[in-house]
Amino acid sequence: MIFVDACFGKETPYTPVWMMRQAGRYLPEYMEVRKKAGNFLNLCHSPKLASEVTLQPVDIVGVDAAIIFSDILVVPNEMGMELDFVKGEGPVFEKPIREKKDLDKLIGGKEAADKLDYVYETIKLTREKLDKDKALIGFTGAPWTLATYMIEGQGTKTYSVVKKMLYSNPQFLHEVLKKVSEVVKHYLANQIRAGVDVVQIFDSWAAALEKDAYFEFSWRYIKDIVSYIKKEFPNTPIIVFPKGIGAYLDDIDGDFDVFGVDWGTPMELAKEKLGAKYVLQGNMEPCRLYSKVATKEAVEKISSIMQNKRHIFNLGHGILPDVPVENAKYFISLAKEVTKR
């Protein structure tokens, strides 16, 4: 397979291979750096340490790109929402958005994005150390995913608070999404100016919405952000990853370059619906990394399906914490091997 990719600046002899942004968080070397930082947010706020852990998966696992170490929730944090990572619970916002006065207190636009200077410094430090033939990927959460955290106050299985707002007060939810979108636009633009080669938009909670709601409350904002970035930086590739919307592929459109395919969406279907227009990324089921046999089976199948089509090997979502590092290395080496055939 041949993949012509602006982030590498040339025609590559094999499909690029990288992994979801969580990959580096479970390396033993990462845990050592994490101890130095004291806690997760401190690590995000320390450019030197964040750059170090950004480079670890490239050096240790052998991927073709570095994904900048950060977290999607630094955006609402710098908008003015107090963020804490609680052991056993995950990220928690002490004062979630429930009414207009809560939203009005938050900083918006370029002002909020400029407060993320530690991310931009991490990018600059990483770009200086990263080999020139390796891409550097920046990222953000999609407005819907960010707003869900901001309104629920933490991760959720029911989405009851944000969905109540969606159906009972849709106008206000749009106000939240618009404000978040404006910050995200400037955030991605600043990342590109700082030195990333590619940007990715993660819509982790996409599957929480029925089709019409998804396109009104999520996809339209992703498209708006993509249009803004393409106007400002026409040569910067954009990856979108809306998790769990395989049933909606017929209506996916936009000026982005790469569509991330989650593991629940058959690669054959994604190829049929989107392969002629976009580079596809993905989509190995992360739990296959527990078995080298299962990993090889998936890599061979994906390679067979995507033969002669533009493709980036990747997991179909985040790596799990107890996956042996040896197995992750095996996935990378095998993916490179099969794509050189």
Image (cartoon, rainbow, N blue to C red):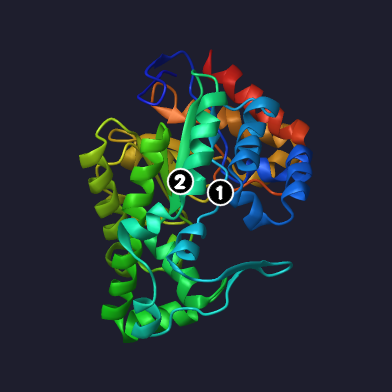
Image side of residue 9 versus residue 88, left or right: left
Q: Is residue 232 above or below residue 55?
A: below
Look at the numbered disc 2 and give the secondary structure of its residue. strand
Q: Secondary structure at mark 1?
A: loop
- Residue at image point 39% right, 52% down: 114
- Residue found at x 39% / y 55%: 113
Label number found at residue 257: none
Q: Nearer the viewer, residue 14 or 137?
A: 137
**Which of the two discs, 1 and 2, labels the residue nearer the N terminus?**
1
Q: Position of residue 55 (x, y in %)?
A: 62, 32
What residue does disc 1 label? 70
Hey, what amino acid is under mark 1? Ser
Mark 1 Cα shell of 10 Å, populated few (<14), some (14-19), many (≥20): many
Residue for badge 2: 139
Q: Position of residue 299 (x, y in %)?
A: 59, 30
Residue 210 visible: yes
Kindly indicate whether the residue at mark 2 contacts the one at mark 1 (C-beta within 8 angstroms): yes
Question: Residue 52's quadrant in the figure?
Answer: top right
The image quadrant that residue 259 belongs to is top left
- Taking the image as shown, residue 336 lies to the left or right of residue 25, namely left
Identify which residue is drawn at 41% across, 78% down.
163
